[in-house]
């Protein structure tokens, strides 16, 4: 145990270098980045001289003339009191967080209006064994109403519930979506008047019901659609179930929505098929009139716990290079480009990520057609991750187990990594799969690790240096960096 009063370099040190002089340092537990425009070697000399904790007097004596620098490093918690500074969570805190009461000021309930789909995407997350993908399954109005009511009852006063119409392809059951909205507006809004209800739809938009544009506009439904590239690429990735092209139909529906003034967020799932065309995809999203452009590396496993063919897995280095090129091009501003807009939220002072998504908290329940409630869309049909059925009390034990296992200070792959509080450990699906005892596919698991680690760090590094460049520009002009409102949490599901 370190005696009190000794200074040490934080164990959570993120250190980035650029060129001969620039250095960027951050303690990820406190997240207040320090940008060094000149004098990198001077800072490195101080930090390298602290192989063991030192009293402040010994440190300032060893580095005479650097007292101001030492104080600056202390202010930014790059140097910390090794005995007193809190730098991680202990097992008791993790257990208490997992088992204790949770605030629910925001929830998103994913209603699988149908588990069937009219497309035959080459990377579909819906396994035929867990989802009723090849049936004509339809959620009933009663199940949908119970689902929304159950979430409203769990929501804190003043909270916000987002009802997400999902599938399968939700437009195959469009009448139910309209009925859910009617019930929310006419019944639930009055009985839960202290809570806000909004709506979202994730759809392939190959269908366009006659009243789709009018309903979306009237009820301010947010829209997410996959466009995996220009027509030739998209049609390879997302054909219909007979193998026919779909891009033209989807693009026509997008055009109708955009012409009506409705924001449409477009997302590309990145595979080996389109990994070399990331700039082209970003440009195509812009040409289609998208409000946001999102890039999501394909998950290598579906809900059946079946791995994708190895030849579909993209190269993480290619993805990193392509996304960096899009980001630096300025084609999309940061607030409208995923994953940069989402990761920007992680770099605010004091931000701390102990898991990468909200699924283990129970605030994003997925309700399938029969009323069973699951932790995540990728885990539908897996009994271990079913934590409820409508009409019965939800069992929090699967959530508690998942939250404790995924906490970055409990995860063996994360607990020693200084980036862990900046990234939250990455998408949990690849971690929950091994927990379920599935025989591992080495290539897929390595791909998942690199997407969770290397890919995430590369995106965060781009944002760190962008923040540094903004600070340098402001300082050169004698201005303080403009305060920016944080972006809204971005949707990828």
Image: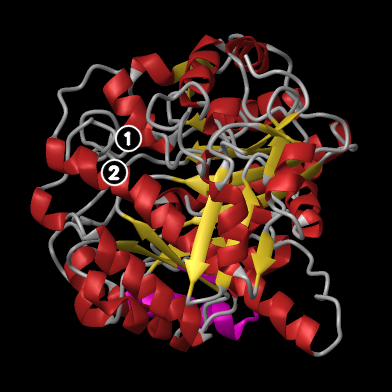
For mark 1, what is the residue?
A: 430
Could you tell me residue 43's position as x and y percent? 62, 60
> Does residue 276 appear left or right of residue 477 in this picture?
left
> Does residue 451 appear left or right of residue 239 in this picture?
right
Could you tell me residue 76's position as x and y percent? 75, 50
Q: Residue at x 41, y 37 (%)?
A: 377
Q: Which label was assigned to residue 174?
A: none
Task: Please identify the quadrant where the N terminus is shown.
Answer: top right
- Front residue of 226 and 69: 69
Above or below, 404 relative to 13: above
Q: Within 10 Å of the Cα at label 1, are there few (<14), some (14-19), or many (20+) other Cα atoms? A: many
For mark 2, what is the residue?
A: 448
Q: Residue at x 20, y 55 (%)?
A: 120
> Badges 1 and 2: C-beta atoms under 8 Å apart?
yes
Please report whichever mark, 1 or 2, sits nearer to the chain's N-terminal start. 1
Q: Main secondary structure of the magenta part?
A: helix
Q: Is residue 361 magenta?
A: no
- Front residue of 422 and 247: 422
Q: Is residue 263 magenta?
A: yes
Mark 1 and mark 2: Cα distance apart in space: 6 Å
Q: Residue at x 63, y 31 (%)?
A: 53
Q: What kind of element bears circle 2?
A: helix
Count of numbered circles in the view:
2
Q: Which residues are magenta?
A: 249-266
Q: What kind of element bears circle 1?
A: helix
Could you tell me residue 253's position as x and y percent? 45, 75
């Amino acid at each position: 145990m370190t005696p009190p009063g000794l200074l040490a370099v934080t164990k959570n040190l993120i250190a980035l270098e650029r060129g001969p002089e620039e250095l960027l340092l951050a303690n990820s537990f406190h997240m207040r980045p320090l940008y060094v425009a000149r004098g990198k070697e001077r800072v490195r000399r101080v930090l390298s001289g602290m192989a063991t904790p030192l009293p402040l007097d010994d440190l300032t004596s060893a580095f005479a003339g650097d007292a101001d620098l030492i104080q600056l490093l202390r202010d930014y918690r790059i140097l910390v009191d090794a005995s007193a500074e809190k730098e991680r969570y202990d097992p008791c805190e993790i257990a208490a967080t997992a088992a204790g009461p949770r605030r629910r000021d925001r929830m998103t309930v994913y209603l699988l209006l149908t588990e069937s789909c009219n497309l035959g995407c080459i990377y579909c997350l819906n396994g035929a064994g867990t989802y009723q993908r090849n049936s004509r399954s339809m959620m009933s109005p009663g199940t949908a109403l119970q689902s929304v009511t159950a979430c409203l009852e769990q929501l804190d006063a003043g909270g916000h519930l987002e009802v997400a119409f999902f599938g399968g392809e939700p437009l195959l059951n469009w009448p139910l979506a309209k009925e859910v909205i009617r019930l929310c507006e006419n019944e639930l809004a009055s009985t839960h008047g202290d809570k806000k209800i909004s709506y979202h739809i994730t759809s392939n938009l190959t269908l366009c019901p006659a009243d789709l544009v009018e309903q979306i506009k009237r009820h301010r439904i947010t829209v997410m659609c996959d466009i995996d590239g220009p027509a030739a690429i998209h049609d390879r990735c997302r054909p219909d179930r007979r193998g026919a092209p779909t891009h033209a139909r989807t693009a026509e529906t997008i055009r109708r929505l955009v012409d009506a003034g409705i924001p449409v967020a477009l997302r590309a799932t990145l595979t080996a098929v389109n990994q070399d065309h990331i700039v082209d995809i970003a440009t195509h999203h812009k040409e289609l009139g998208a409000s946001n452009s999102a890039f999501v590396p394909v998950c290598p496993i579906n809900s059946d716990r079946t791995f994708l063919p190895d030849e579909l897995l993209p190269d993480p280095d290619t993805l990193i290079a392509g996304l960096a090129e899009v980001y630096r091009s300025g084609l999309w501003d940061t607030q409208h480009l995923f994953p940069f807009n989402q990761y920007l939220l992680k770099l605010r002072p004091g931000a701390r990520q102990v898991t990468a998504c909200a699924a283990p908290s129970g605030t994003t329940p997925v309700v399938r057609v029969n009323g069973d409630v699951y932790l995540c869309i990728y885990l539908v049909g897996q009994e271990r991750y079913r934590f409820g059925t409508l009409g019965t009390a939800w069992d929090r034990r699967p959530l508690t187990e998942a939250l404790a296992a995924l906490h970055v200070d409990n995860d063996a792959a994360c607990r020693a990594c200084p980036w862990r509080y900046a990234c939250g450990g990455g998408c949990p699906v690849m971690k929950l799969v091994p927990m379920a005892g599935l025989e591992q596919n080495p290539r897929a698991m390595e791909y998942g690790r690199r997407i969770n680690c290397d890919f995430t760090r590369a995106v965060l590094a781009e944002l760190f240096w962008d923040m540094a460049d903004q600070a340098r520009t402001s300082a050169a002009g004698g201005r303080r960096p403009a305060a920016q409102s944080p972006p809204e949490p971005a949707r990828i599901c």
